[in-house]
Amino acid sequence: MGVEIRVEAPKPKRISAHSHIRGLGLDEKGRAIRVADGLVGQIEAREAAGIIVRMIQEGRIAGRGILLVGPPGTGKTAIAIAIARELGEDTPFVALSGSEIYSSEKKKTEILTEALRRALGVRIKERRVVYEGVVRELKIRRARHPFMPYMVVPREARITLATKDDEVTLTVGEEITRQILEMGIRRGDVIWIDAETGRVFRVGKAKSVEKARYYDIETHRIVEIPSGSVKKEKEIVRTYTLHDLDLYVSAQRALISIFSIGVEKEIPPEVRRDVDEMVKKWIDEKKAVIVPGVLFIDDAHMMDIEAFSFLSRAMESEFSPIIILATNRGMARIRGTDIESPHGMPLDLLDRLLIIPTKPYSPDEIREIVKIRAVEEEIELEDDALEELVRIGSETSLRYAVQLMEPARIIALNNNRSRVTIDDVREARKLFIDLGQSVKYLKEYEEKFLKL
Ligand SMILES: Nc1ncnc2c1ncn2[C@@H]1O[C@H](COP(=O)(O)OP(=O)(O)OP(=O)(O)O)[C@@H](O)[C@H]1O
Ligand SMILES: [Mg+2]
């Protein structure tokens, strides 16, 4: 009795093609380490990306854009993702594919505007009066629900908060009690309660609480017990995106004109204008700073002339995130026009971009990348299976070699093997052809068909 056994079904791990990437793998001088953070080779492009990260962090890149260019499978998307990892959680990073701007529900410019505003953070500093301390005692009083007497609901709580120098016992109402229960706050936790809004925030678990009554299985952040008085003014820093603020303001307005709820798919322009005004005022009053994030648009050649000119204009505007584009096209027609242009993009946009090239990989680099992916996907490769994948990767593309690994694993399993052999790889290659082969196949088929 009293023993709780929690059985958790193993969650199927969703492994994306880039899950092995942890960062750019640079040393403290910004030089790329050959194999680090899941990235292999592509030294110059990674170092260039590192400089971009520095520029973003120092806020010196607004109004500019980056273009990653290189043949398919040379790590353009991988490097963009590594940039996001380097920037950390507080910097917004929004990823979009060029084709995603076409939707039947929203205008292209609306999709782009929203993406741009999601990529702009507003860090707001507020001074709030809070009660902060370690929870010494916590008693929850429950009562019968007034309308449903068979239900017992938490009514209020008596909570004793202590600092190194002070101790206060508060009686808090239903709303705060609910938060305390939901957050699983217990004795020994360091928390603060906003005196005005009643928002509860858990800082972590206090250091050196000897008689902790429970066994801590989850790892909580261990923090110092605060000093000074329990009731105090505290500076709170939070980061919202401009899009969060747009949503917040339009929800408030929707309450006033209740009929518009759910009807509006797009945020009205006047809401955005007012949010901008509000943010500018906060900045003037030194209550907020802008945190420019990144809007990454993959396969950028999929966008059309309208989208490109919209982006050029966006780069000039007052609030603008860093725009990173990627493409594998050389000379191409700009969508929506008859004009051929480098990378299928208009020259006035190209003029504003810093271009980072990615280069094809050497067999050694392909070997390293395949090995990293094998670990990530928990696939055991025999040595000659690995070499076969390296060969395939050099002849066709890295992407194709990486994609063959999972089918090869299944083929091995069907043959009761846990390790993938060279035959499994060859079998997979027969079943799933690469792009060159598929084009050739259809061409031959068409020729035959025409001769009939
Ligand atoms: N330098 C690298 N180190 C480790 N993994 C890499 C590296 N470059 C590419 N990869 C991995 O190889 C695969 C293909 O790379 P990626 O998708 O980044 O290519 P791409 O240049 O964006 O290609 P495309 O032009 O087709 O979009 C991905 O799984 C990616 O994570
Ligand atoms: Mg890509």
Image (cartoon, helix red, strand yellow):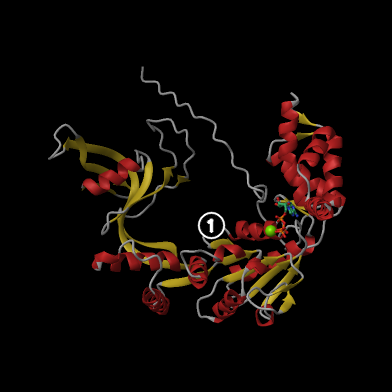
The extreme front residue here reads: 452
Relative depth, front residue between 111 and 27 = 111
Instruction: Give the residue drawn at x 77%, y 38%.
Output: 428
Relative depth, front residue between 180 and 193 = 180
Q: Is residue 284 left or right of residue 176?
A: right
Q: Is residue 22 left or right of residue 276?
A: right
Give the quarter of the image for residue 74. Answer: bottom right
Q: Tell me residue 140's x, y (percent).
A: 24, 38
Give the quarter of the image for residue 14. Answer: top right
Q: Quadrant of the N terminus?
A: top left
Q: Tell me residue 280's x, y (percent).
A: 42, 78
- Asked if disc 1 is less than 8 Å from ligand 1, the answer is no
Q: Secondary structure at mark 1?
A: loop
Residue type at mark 1 is Glu
Relative depth, front residue between 233 and 451 = 451
Q: Is residue 241 above or below residue 440?
A: below
Q: Is residue 335 left or right of residue 75?
A: left
In the rendered image, is residue 34 in sight? no
Instruction: Give the residue drawn at x 53%, y 75%.
Output: 320
- Report the residue marked by disc 1: 89
Q: Is residue 46 above or below residue 371?
A: below
Q: Is residue 42 above or below residue 303?
A: above
Q: Is residue 137 left or right of residue 58?
A: left
Relative depth, front residue between 240 and 158 = 240
Q: Residues within 10 Å of mark 1 (few under 14, many from 20)?
A: few
Q: Tell me residue 274's x, y (percent).
A: 37, 77
In the rendered image, is residue 150 in sight? yes
Give the quarter of the image for residue 356. Answer: bottom right
